[in-house]
Image (tube, helix red, strand yellow):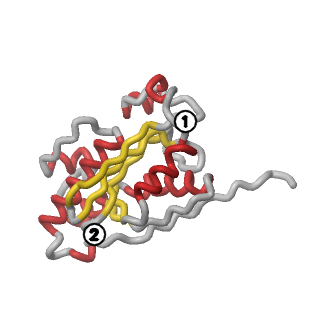
Amino acid sequence: MSRNYVALDIETTGLNPEQDEIIEIGAVRYEDGVPTMVYSSLIKPRSMVSSRITEITGITNSMLENERSCEEVLPEFLEFLGTEDIIGHNVRFDYSFLKVHAYKQKRSFDNNAIDTLYLAKKLHPELESRSLGAMCLHYEIINEHAHRAFDDAKACAELYEKMYNKFGGNNQEAFLAKPISYKIKKEESITN
């Protein structure tokens, strides 16, 4: 069971890590279960943010126009992250985007991870929904700005801590960070 970790969340222009872009990264570093450092950055994408993404996240194109690019932000974030275990709600989504974008910048990203969605499904089979919003309601966690990276990362960490405090003694195996396998699709030209 990990007590040193970085809870993280990202917002993106879509659902495909091979094609879509990261527009926000938020993270909270925990040491011995206590928050010690935070990271938050908007990122200017190459393409426009759709009205659907703005509707979900509240992030507009005008908010991003003067922000740094992913090529500038990602190395800084990976340095903040270091080799710590990461925690996220449906963490494979965040991991896949970070992995692809690190690969495009010829950087490595192989941190082990804990998925609070997996924990919620395992520990709360009785609940109808185990979305981050539903779990925050269940555990009375206040997430003032859902679907914004930093707030979701913070809420995810609080969720992890509450589940750990309630179930960690009897389910230590479930709280161990594990490697995530994500295969990046190689870009190949159609002709030689």
* Disc 1 element: loop
**Quadrant where the image shows the C terminus:** bottom right
Residue 114, image x and y in percent? 33, 64
Residue 159, image x and y in percent? 21, 55
Indicate which disc residue 45 carries. Answer: 1
Residue type (three-letter) at the residue carrying disc 1: Pro
Which residue corresponds to the image point at 59% horizontal and 50% vertical from the top-left? 18
Q: Is residue 99 visible?
A: yes
Residue extending furthest toward the right: 192
Which residue corresponds to the image point at 52% horizontal and 57% vertical from the top-left? 99
Q: Is residue 93 visible?
A: no
190 lies left or right of 84: right
Label 1 neighbour load within 10 Å: few <14, some 14-19, many 20+: many
**Quarter location, residue 175:** bottom left
| Count of residue discs | 2
Which mark is first along the chain, 2 or 1? 2
Which residue corresponds to the image point at 22% horizontal and 65% vertical from the top-left? 32
Relative depth, front residue between 126 and 116: 116
* Disc 2 element: loop
Which residue corresponds to the image point at 37% horizontal and 29% vertical from the top-left? 58
**Quadrant where the image shows the N terminus:** bottom left
Distance CA(mark 1)–CA(mark 2): 33 Å
Residue type (three-letter) at the residue carrying disc 2: Ser
Q: Establish if 179 lies above or below 191.
A: below
182 lies left or right of 163: right
Q: Establish if 82 lies above or below 37.
A: below
Label 2 neighbour load within 10 Å: few <14, some 14-19, many 20+: some
Indicate which disc residue 2 carries. Answer: 2
Residue extending furthest toward the top: 62
